[in-house]
Amino acid sequence: MSVPAPRHPEATAELLARLGPAQVLTDDASCFAASFDNTRYSFLPEAVIRPADVPALQAVLRLANERLVPVTVRGRGTGNTGASAPIRGGWVVHLEHWDGIEIDPQSSVAKVGPGAITQAINDAAAPHGLFFPPDPSSVRFCSIGGNIATNAGGLRAAKYGVVRDFVLALEGLLPTGESVTWSRPLRKFVSGYNLRDLWVGSEGTLGIVTQAWLRLVPLPQARRTFLLGFATDEAALEAAAGLMTSRVAPAVFEFLDRQTVEVAQRRNGRPAFDPAELAGEACPALLLIELDGHPAVLAEDAAKVRAWFAGKALALRETDDPAEAEALWNIRRTCSQAMYLLGNAKLNEDIVVPFRSYVPLIRLARRMRETHGLATPTFGHAADGNFHIHVMYDRDNAEHRRKAETAILEMMREVVAMGGAITGEHGIGISKSPFLRLQHSAAEIAAMVAVKRALDPNGILAPGQIFEPMNVWERTPAKVTLPWDRH
Ligand SMILES: Cc1cc2nc3c(=O)[nH]c(=O)nc-3n(C[C@H](O)[C@H](O)[C@H](O)COP(=O)(O)OP(=O)(O)OC[C@H]3O[C@@H](n4cnc5c(N)ncnc54)[C@H](O)[C@@H]3O)c2cc1C
């Protein structure tokens, strides 16, 4: 049983008196809504702070340091690790209303508030022929502040890179409340230590981003989408890893294993390919490829894709028509929700392995299914080795919970032994905290903790996150429907 977090009624009353009820919300509904992210593990805060401006946020941090009140920053709560959950109670700082977006078309830079929805940045950049390439699947719901704090990746990461590759400068507050600006919105800046990149991916533990400058790139002139069906998972993965030696740089390169395709086809009520196209195979493994760029380069790359997969894929469809492309995308877009046909709870991992380990990884996922009797549908980004292995189980069944926990621990050990990473885009938060020590040596963790202590001497910002192992399987997630559940 977890110990209730200490409460700070006097500090909260003082903050309320200073900032007023419009900025300091203490009602049950506001506190509950800010208590969890997409993992739905709920930890109630004592107040939700919606600061009007930077001085108000500074006042919050200064009082928090004086009275030792935990402070957790919240973006839009789409995180998959519980990183924005206030696990020690205290105050949640919510910056969703700091959502300004200004585009400078000459320098191809977007100046954004941390609460800006990532898709809105692209909507503002598009009229200038520009875009912000990192595209987590949650792009219509998540905030750029959350993307920066998690160094989010996405479908286009293999070609374009992850969020860190596009952050030029950050303005924000140290946990102690001092204002800082890391780097500048310039193409070159090597003055002093690069704490900008340290903040990116630090999961809200080293400072609060109050403004960011992002690099934008020209929108691609053309796109071509391919969907390919394979008889086995191994055939799809071997072909995928091999394509990378053809020097094609797909913008999107997604793998869906047969378990995933089976359940998505069942949910959608139609197959990705007509079985006749697949030599009678009803449930193929799939690769979804999107090429983008100048039409001449794209035509060359498309020819390479066709040549590489000839004789390897059972079926291939391709199009440059946006509506037809959307139909090819359908199974990828719907597969995540479809998995709930296999169990009412999902452990969603985002491990990374080197190309040589693609086939061993998918065999590991199947072995986990055979050993523990739980479905392990797997899909992911075939161009950068970042795969989502899921363990589906019945949350109300203690035996299932134990098996899911054992299976994930075994998988993490094997992934690290393959030279891989326990997380490629979601971060550690609380849900991966039990595995941190599999990935990092004691010296590495001690160095990280030393950085944390240096910037946050009173340990007020997101205390308990990342470094203190928490077994989330013991917790019951809140029963809530979130906006992205319907998509
Ligand atoms: C359907 C779905 C699909 C997803 N697909 C992807 C994907 O393809 N790729 C991917 O990488 N992730 C994906 N995610 C996970 C999630 O969307 C990302 O982690 C996202 O970056 C979180 O953004 P958020 O605004 O929701 O942040 P939150 O979940 O609210 O917070 C995440 C972290 O950011 C910190 N934070 C937020 N704002 C600030 C700030 N201003 N200053 C400092 N720290 C801050 C929080 O404290 C927390 O540590 C997906 C999630 C869902 C639900």
Image (cartoon, rainbow, N blue to C red):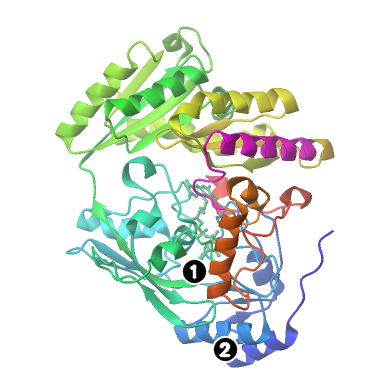
* Front-most of residues 113 and 249: 249
State yes or no: residue 425 in magenta: yes
Mark 2 vs mark 1, CA separation in Å:
18 Å
Instruction: Identify the magenta region.
Output: 400-427
**Which element type, helix, strand or loop, lies under badge 2?**
helix
Residue type indicated by callout 1: Glu
**Label of residue 96 in the image:** 1
Q: Quadrant of residue 268?
A: top right
Percent across and percent down for residue 146 are: 49, 61
Residue plotted at (28% across, 19% down) = 306
Task: Give the mark, 2 or 1, whose residue is nearer the N terminus.
Answer: 2
In the picture, measured across the screen, residue 209 lies left or right of residue 49, that is left
State yes or no: residue 212 in magenta: no
Label 1 beta carbon less than 8 Å to ligand 1 = no
Relative to 233, residue 276 above or below: above
Residue plotted at (57% across, 44% down) = 422
The residue sitting at the left extreme is 296
| Total count of labels | 2
Residue type indicated by callout 2: Leu
Percent across and percent down for residue 374 are: 71, 29
Q: Quadrant of residue 91?
A: bottom right
Residue 73 in sight in this render: no
Residue plotted at (52% across, 38% down) = 420
Percent across and percent down for residue 102 are: 29, 69
In the picture, measured across the screen, residue 178 lies left or right of residue 27, that is left
* Front-most of residues 450 and 265: 450
Q: Which residue is mark 2?
A: 19
Q: In which quadrant is the N terminus drawn? A: bottom right
